[in-house]
Amino acid sequence: MKRYVAACSFGKDSMATVILAKKYKEPLDEVVYCEVMFDEETSGEVPEHRDFVYRIAIPRLKRAGIPVHIVRGEKTFVGQFQHRISGEGRSAGKMWSWPLCGKCYVQRDLKVRPMDAWKRKHWQGDEIIQYVGIADDEMDRLARMDSYQYPTVSLLEKYGVTEDMAMDLCRKHGLLSPIYEFAPRNGCFFCPNAKERELRHLYDHHPDLWGRLLELQALPEKATELFTRELRFDEIDAAFRMDDAQLDLLSEKETIPYDYERICQNALRP
Ligand code: SF4
């Protein structure tokens, strides 16, 4: 059976792809969304984006008659963070801890592998045509489309839609994720590639999640202490607190819960 599918993160480019498919009556049989989980209960999406996905985007697509499949791997970020390195090397026995910039195990274990497993189970034997959210002005990515596993089509390229135009298209249809108000792209809230503005947003608006990352930073026996290429997470936290203190010497901003006992219990959890 021939099936037209769109992998959708609900960022501007993949969202615009679905809008174009509807607008130009392109065949589209299903949308597949892969959600990275921070732990068993907590999404790895930035909360504003997660709310947009579940409260606005998915219901709109379903009302438009487009089936949406949600794929989640069995593994979580917290579980992988505490995964112990095997073997004999210098880091043997330590936790994987923070993903490395440019070599992210979250991408591999919590996105690519669950998606591959899902495709094997649900697309086996079908002729798949996959729509990808690559904009008309993303030359390098368009050039790499030939190497994809399935025949791949960019509707953004076909209809001459650049990244900026994709943003406008989503906005016009009320389907632009609010994440673009404070971030250039959507990604995990614990991403080491996040810009300072994104981290500051998490610090200001989601202290519970910020506190969870501080707890992970405090765990012993990590393969790396560095969250970014240069800084530990608690150093970023200290810098924000310092910024706040300088802005308002009278500020009595509440400290984020920092429960070391709970951290150690979490670390021992299977
Ligand atoms: S958004 Fe960041 S942490 Fe998440 S998969 Fe991509 S690179 Fe990894």
Image (spheres, rainbow, N blue to C red):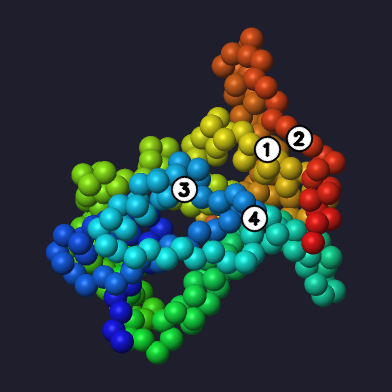
Q: In this view, does 261 lie to the left or right of 101?
A: right
Mark nearest the camera among 3 and 2 is: 3
Q: In this view, does 109 lie to the left or right of 137?
A: right
- Circle 2: is it few (<14), some (14-19), or many (20+) Cα within 10 Å? some
Q: How many marks?
A: 4
Label 1 sits on residue: 211
Label 3 sits on residue: 50
In the rendered image, the quadrant that contains the C terminus is bottom right
- Circle 4: is it few (<14), some (14-19), or many (20+) Cα within 10 Å? few
Residue contact between numbered discs 3 and 4, judged by CB atoms under 8 Å: no
Identify whether 33 is placed above or below 38.
Answer: below
In which quadrant of the rendered view does residue 263 lie?
A: top right
Residue contact between numbered discs 2 and 4, judged by CB atoms under 8 Å: no
Identify whether 3 is placed above or below 225.
Answer: below
Residue contact between numbered discs 1 and 2, judged by CB atoms under 8 Å: yes
In the rendered image, the quadrant that contains the N terminus is bottom left
Label 2 sits on residue: 258
- Say whether disc 1 or disc 3 marks the residue closer to the N-terminus: 3
Q: Distance between the residues labelled 1 and 3?
A: 19 Å
Q: Which mark is residue 117?
A: none
- Say whether disc 4 or disc 1 marks the residue closer to the N-terminus: 4
Q: Picture coordinates of residue 191 (x, y %)? A: 56, 51
Q: Dot 4 lies on which element?
A: loop
- Say whether disc 3 or disc 4 marks the residue closer to the N-terminus: 4
- Say whether disc 1 or disc 2 marks the residue closer to the N-terminus: 1
- Circle 1: is it few (<14), some (14-19), or many (20+) Cα within 10 Å? some
Residue flagged by tag 2: what amino acid is it?
A: Tyr
